[in-house]
Amino acid sequence: MKARLRFMTTRQKPRATDATLVWERPEPASRPSPGPLSRERIVRAAIALADAEGLASVSLRKVGAALDAGPMRLYGYLSTKEELLELMVDAVYGEMASEGPLHGDWREALRSMAHRIRRAARVHKWFVELLGGRPHLGPNALAHLEASLAALSDSPGFEDIDAVLQAVGTVHAYVIGAIRSEESELRAERESGMDKTQWQSASWGYLQRMIATGRFPTLAKVVRDATHPAFDVVFDKGLDYVLDGIAAQLER
């Protein structure tokens, strides 16, 4: 997270193109005909398309068709598909912000942050595909980041802003990995047509034969003794490990 949050320092000169970022670019004057448009309507149509058909289905042509507008009209509101994706991400961050501020001590605040991201990714399954790269700079994304950092900055042990960045970034990285793993398993079920029980049944004979070779004693213990809890339990247990690790670091 720290590496991904290297924003421009005061010694760096802004590029001439910075003022053209979509967040500061005014929208065209509204026209009632052939149909009213706005960035908000465009983004909501794109989100509805992604929710229904997946992120790969989102294109300016399809979004324009959903709004009875040609793709060229959309270019008055955004310049590229990448800008549309950024606007979509920021809209989801806005939904997360509507849940209110993060409360409690640093553990409770980080836990709330983690669950908000996970809930958003369950509603919008494409959301996690757009996380983990460069920082998102939309107003809602920045508000989410500000709230996450501020929730820790006044806590004992987090006097150093680098410690705040490391803690928030570590939890964020865990959440992205966990929900990507969940979604990959669910996608595999959808694409194979087999649920978890059916897949295990189909694979059981092969797995038994491999374990019988004696080459995988620890895997045999997993098959024999592990409880294999539900996604919700696995997520919270993993999050506890992360938070316990942060607490141990603070004690040092």
Image (spheres, rainbow, N blue to C red):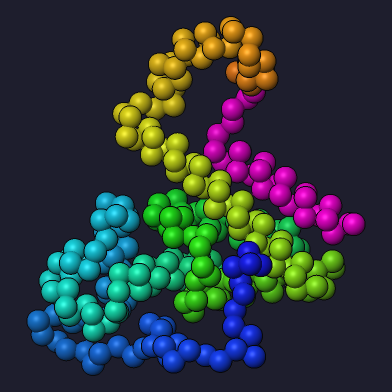
Q: Is residue 165 above or below residue 199?
A: below
Quadrant where the N terminus is found in the figure:
bottom right
Q: Is 55 or 6 nearer to us in this picture?
A: 6
Magenta: main secondary structure equals helix
At a point 44% along the width and 17% down the height, the residue shown is 203
Q: Is 56 or 140 nearer to us in this picture?
A: 56
At a point 42% along the width and 67% down the height, the residue shown is 89
Residue 242 in the magenta stretch? The answer is: yes
How many marks can you see? 0
Q: Position of residue 114 (x, y in %)?
A: 60, 56
State left or right for residue 106 relative to residue 3: right
At a point 46% along the width and 10% down the height, the residue shown is 205
Q: Position of residue 109 (x, y in %)?
A: 68, 62
Residue extending farthest to the left is 34
Residue 161 in the magenta stretch? The answer is: no
Quarter of the image where one finds residue 50: bottom left
State left or right for residue 219 relative to residue 152: left
Quarter of the image where one finds residue 213: top right
Quadrant where the C terminus is found in the figure:
bottom right
Q: Is residue 161 above or below residue 238?
A: below
Q: Is 135 or 46 nearer to us in this picture?
A: 135
Residue extending farthest to the right is 252
At a point 59% along the width and 83% down the height, the residue shown is 8
Residue 102 visible to the viewer: no
Q: Is residue 106 above or below residue 142?
A: above
State left or right for residue 172 relative to residue 36: right
Residue 227 visible to the viewer: yes
Q: Which residues are magenta?
A: 226-252
Q: Position of residue 41 (x, y in %)?
A: 27, 74
Q: Position of residue 148 (x, y in %)?
A: 64, 68
Quarter of the image where one finds residue 30: bottom left
